[in-house]
Amino acid sequence: MDLRQLRSFVAVVEEGGFARAAQRLFLSPPAVTAHVKALEREIGARLLERSPLELTDSGRRLMTCARTLLEAEQRALQVADAPADGEVLRVGVMGHGSAELTPATIAAFARAKPDVTIRLVPLSFQEHVSALVERRVDVAFVRPAPVDDRIVSDVMTTESRILVTSRRSELAAAASVSVEEVLDLRYVDIPAASPREFADFMYFGRARNGDPVRRSEDVTFTPHDVLLSAALARGVGSSVQSFRRFYSWPGVAFVPIRDAPVEQTVLASRATDRRPVVAAFRSIATTLASTVSAVDGRFCGPRA
């Protein structure tokens, strides 16, 4: 029995529908439906009545067992992840995180809490929220701030926006471009499971008034995927200003978008996670962010 199928089944019941379960799990609705159907085939019984949605007798019996198994999985992961001599903190980092604040925070925390083991976890675009919700990381440097009641966000940097495009592009040599000039470009695609707020960030969703995005055939999961697509002139991407300091790729140009709203990078964590180790990491991160002037994520010395 696949635990992914059980997670989908439990989510459908708890959320009261397949679409809401898909949003919670950061999967597509067809994927959640396929998981439930596969579970029904394996058990040999119908688990859910679809209209209206309600558990069958078999479904009610499985629901109790499924919750027990998923809780046991979480306990097992926590036990396996904890080192014998102390706590562990799993730090997710999407792309370059919050610029120089990311390594600065991790280094300061390591000095303050030498008994805590830090594990770094690279995150893809679609793991913007899911890594936290699924408890694969404890804190995460991401952008933009997740819109999810289960997540709290501490602002790290506030940055202007850039276009990531091929040096062969007509816009590559421009000193800057406007949002209007970039809306109709062909953008790299991102995974269907990526949160809506990340798609709005990448494609300037608030400026589109509902108009669709022109997307390339390249589905990108990481900044390196975006850079490769841009270098080949197959698709453009967008990011925050500090991105250009951390990534260099032959044939790629970074063009400031002069009238785009600024965007924030954040340290995200679970709203219900009140462990001292998480509170300490957040405190160090926010202290660094508040006492060091950051212009587009670059440290410029202490504030006056």
Image (cartoon, rainbow, N blue to C red):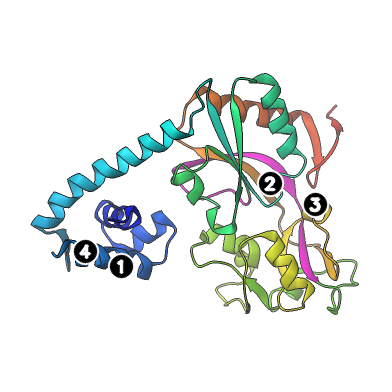
The secondary structure type at the circle numbered 3 is helix
- Viewer-closest of 262 and 143: 143
Q: Which residue is found at the position 62% from the left and 52% from the top? A: 144
Q: Is residue 71 left or right of residue 164?
A: left
Image quarter hosting the N terminus: bottom left
Query: In whole angstroms, how far apart are the C-alphas of marks 4 and 1?
Result: 14 Å
Residue type, mark 2 in image: Gly
Mark 4 secondary-structure assignment:
helix
Q: Is residue 95 left or right of residue 1?
A: right
Q: Amino acid at mark 3?
A: Phe
Give above or below for 284 relative to 298: above
| Label 4 – label 2 distance at C-alpha | 42 Å
What residue is shown with label 2?
Answer: 97
Disc 3 versus disc 4: nearer the observer: 4
The residue shown at (58%, 77%) is: 211
Quadrant assignment for the C terminus? top right
User: From where the camera sits, is residue 272 visible?
Assistant: no
Residue 98 is left or right of residue 166, and the answer is left
Camera-side mark, 4 or 2: 4
Dot 2 or dot 1, earlier in sequence: 1
**How much space separates mark 3 and mark 4, taking CA atoms?**
48 Å
As displayed, is residue 13 above or below residue 73?
Answer: below
**Numbered tag placed on residue 246 in the rendering:** 3
- Magenta-colored stretch includes residue 20: no
The circle on residue 33 is 1
Mark 4 or mark 1, whichever is nearer to me = 4
Given residues 136 and 182, the one toward you in this image is: 136
In this view, 229 is above or below 304: below
Around disc 4, counting alpha carbons within 10 Å, would you say few (fewer than 14), some (14 to 19), or many (20 or more)? few
* Whether label 1 touches label 3, CB < 8 Å: no
